[in-house]
Amino acid sequence: MEIRRRGKRENNGQPMETLQHVDGVEDESWKNQTYFSTLKTTLAALCVLVLLNGFVYYMDNRLPEVEQSTSANGFDAKRAMSTLAKLSDIGARPVGSDENEIFAVNALTAEIDSIALDQGNANDVQVLNQRVSGSYRKKKFANWLDYRNLKNVVVKLKPKGGDNIVEEAVLLNCHFDTVPATAGVSDDGLQCAVMMELVRVLAKCNDLRRPIIFLFNGGEEIGLQASHGFITQHPWSKHVKYFINLEGAGAGGKEMIFQTTESNSFLVDLYARAVPRPYGNVIGEEIYQTEVLPSDTDFRIFRYFGNLSGLDLAHYKNGYVYHTKYDDLNQIEPAVLQNTGNNVLALCKIFSSHNGTTQPNAKYVYFDVLGLYMFSYTQQSGVLYNCTVAVVSFVSIVLSLRQLAKGMSPKTYRLYLLTVVAGPICTFLLTVLSSVLVAYILDVLGRSMSWYNNKINLMVYFATSTLTILLLTVLYPRNKTRTRADWTLSLFNGYQLFWTILLVITTILGLRSSFALMIIVLFPAVTNCILGLLRIRKNPHLWMTIYVASLLVPITYTFYITQIFLSFSIPISGRFGSDFNMDYIIGLLVSISTFATVGYMSPVIMMVKKPRLIVYGLCGLLLLSIIVIVSPLGFPYSDGVIISPKNERFKLMHVQQTFYNFEKQVRRNGSGFLVENWDRNSRFISKYVPKMTEAVNVDCSKELLCGLPLTKSSQPSNSWIPFAPSMPSLKSSTHVSLSNESTRSRRMQFKLLGPEMINVYISPYPGVNLTAWSFTDQPEVSTQWENNDVYVVKHASGTKDEEYKFWLEIQSEYGFNEATVNVTVSFDWVVYKTMALDNEFKEFINSFPPWSHVTYSVSSVYAFVY
């Protein structure tokens, strides 16, 4: 028997009918509610999401028109492209090569000399180049870096005369050296070309109040060493007040603010006010400064060793070509240089005229809006804004839920409230779990990174699984005492509450990135309040339409942030090593983005006539994704013939090993190929390279750091292929002089003759201490091997066949009649034109498939016991 009654409840003072149930029987008027068409609603939602994504993509990739400047004060991208072409024509410029030490330096110096001779200059153009040597400990990796005879090209524009001239200078930095395998057009030739054009333009500028120093440094790729030589040794460096570091992590797009100096990040406020096309947000900075990314820039050197305030700007689009043979002029549009030139020119002018002593010492929150405008404010102001938005949101949610819950019994209300609050949290956790599960399944099937070559696969795998979870969790827990319209409005409030709680938590944790959550909460919170004041709750369809419309702004911005971070993180996924599955990170990013966009609107499915049809459709897409996984569409790489190159990376080293005992006799010889595998799919390269089937695990317990040219013990991302043939004869020698200062103290003098790159590994035995050495500062431990301390020194030289000298002082509790210290020396030949290759090594290199990118070197390792 069915018993029904109709009750009354109030909505903002207005009577409104509410359906209630007795004996658990649903009122027939459920069937009389007005529902949205399933097909039309689905198509409309898809169209809106596609259009928003398309709009965001257009704005993110929009670049200025390139016009040849008719003004002496305008940036000319075509002229900058000619400078870039000159550097590109030189080819690869690794440290120690003639291309870097002679040809590139001469090309840059010739252009600067021509600028200095221009009669139209309003500022003095001074040149004071450097040849630098030194050493330091790189805090990120704990290794000691030692360098000799690196070259820097240094130019200063000094305003002529006047009482208003400020001696404090602005520094611009780029590096003209490259890794051995590439001409380095984007990393970092592009920025050096921009800087050269800025020298030309700013030399004629009458508005400068500070000197501007341009550092073209010749040793960044070996560990940021040339910039260290400038900031610690150049006479102009002590006058630098601000710096702008210009880098490249990809070829194309806009240059982004990667990071700011924390103590004086107000500089980003100047950036926001000055540049015509601001680009960047603090989320990227907070991620970058966690130091989890396999990347570093000269920014670190200026911050740590110069204690300077500055900005780190870099291109990142098309990071697939970074450090590969494809980083050439074909990847660069003149509009890229125009955008960067216009922005940095404006930045130089405001830095040159700004009085920084009046600025507060505070961290800043900053983010751009589609490259049109940048918001910047202090972190303290951000806390105030976040708290205000959170309060408004909480108030709007409480008022809304109280109206929707009228007529409920206390017990039903508590259950209803728990469902509204806990539902989105559980849904979020389930969506995260679904992305982890999909990533795990892809890895088990051997199809990791199938999105690397085709971003659409991210939608196929991760977005559809997230959407399925979202819609199922929306449909399942509906409270039967509420109409579908009431329940839909309740869920909107539940999702708003979820993001509000997250906003409060991240604000308490001090994350400046919480601004993104503030944007997600702000618009629906304000809209919710306005809708309450307008008293239109009795028209749920109108309420829903207005509320969903308010979500378009945060959804658009979420798409914007997602596109930026996918464009950056997907290419960099190819450099994380084979022992880490990047599907977890990328899948989680897509899942969270889907939850923050489509998930916010997902309650609308309650008002669709046949919501289960949409769920069935998503389940069908999940099944179809299996076809994509096993089809060519799921292959992660391309060789650049049909579409842009997306390579799998490998580094090969031909290693010759010689191990000596305490009596200075050779106890063992060895040789082989060391393979550094750079991404998850490297595990399966033996399908294409038969010789990789011979790889074995390295026993690192017997020899210091495995007896290989590594800076730490061998990782799963490395493969070792032992073999008998020896390498071609390579010029190297090691001479050690021992002098006993006492029965417990000894000085060891080393003289090494070899290539431009030499690594030294020092590991004292228990009871023995390394007390001093010829490098800067006192010795500090770099890593551990078999519970023993290891000191790693990485040496680089800009000159060939130079004798490398250093000394160590050790103290031994038991004297020197037995073994006290392991010393291993690794000579590494990386300059291709001077490298001798064994025929078997050549065949091994050439055996890799065309969609791979292979860099290679030759090493001789000598291990001694003293």
Image (tube, rainbow, N blue to C red):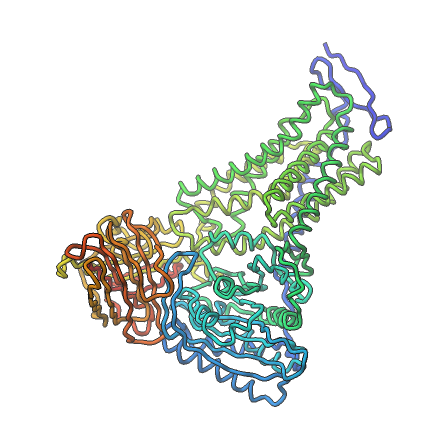
**In the displayed structure, does residue 466 sit left or right of residue 27?**
left
Q: Position of residue 147 (x, y in %)?
A: 37, 69
In this view, the residue in front, 246 or 772, is: 772
Q: Residue furthest front?
A: 742
Is residue 843 at all visible to an observer of this figure?
A: no
Work out whether residue 143 or residue 615 is closer to the camera in this orientation and state it.
143
Residue at 29% x, 75% y: name it: 802
Is 854 placed left or right of 338 in the picture? Answer: left
Instruction: Report the front residue among 637 and 348.
Output: 348
Residue 631 percent across, percent down from the top left: 45, 47
User: Which quadrant of the view contains residue 499?
Assistant: top right
In the visual, does 526 lie left or right of 186?
right
Residue most toward the top?
Answer: 1
660 vs 335: above or below: above
Q: Is residue 714 left or right of residue 474?
A: left
Q: Quadrant of the C terminus?
A: bottom left
562 relative to 133, above or below = above
Quarter placement of the N terminus = top right
The residue that appears at 86% across and 28% down in the rendered structure is 13
Vertically, is 8 above or below 794? above
| Residue 272: % across, % down | 67, 62
Specify whether residue 265 is in view: yes
Front residue of 156/851: it is 156
Q: How many marks?
A: 0
Q: Give residue 187's position: percent from left, percent from top.
A: 48, 67
- The residue most toward the right is 14
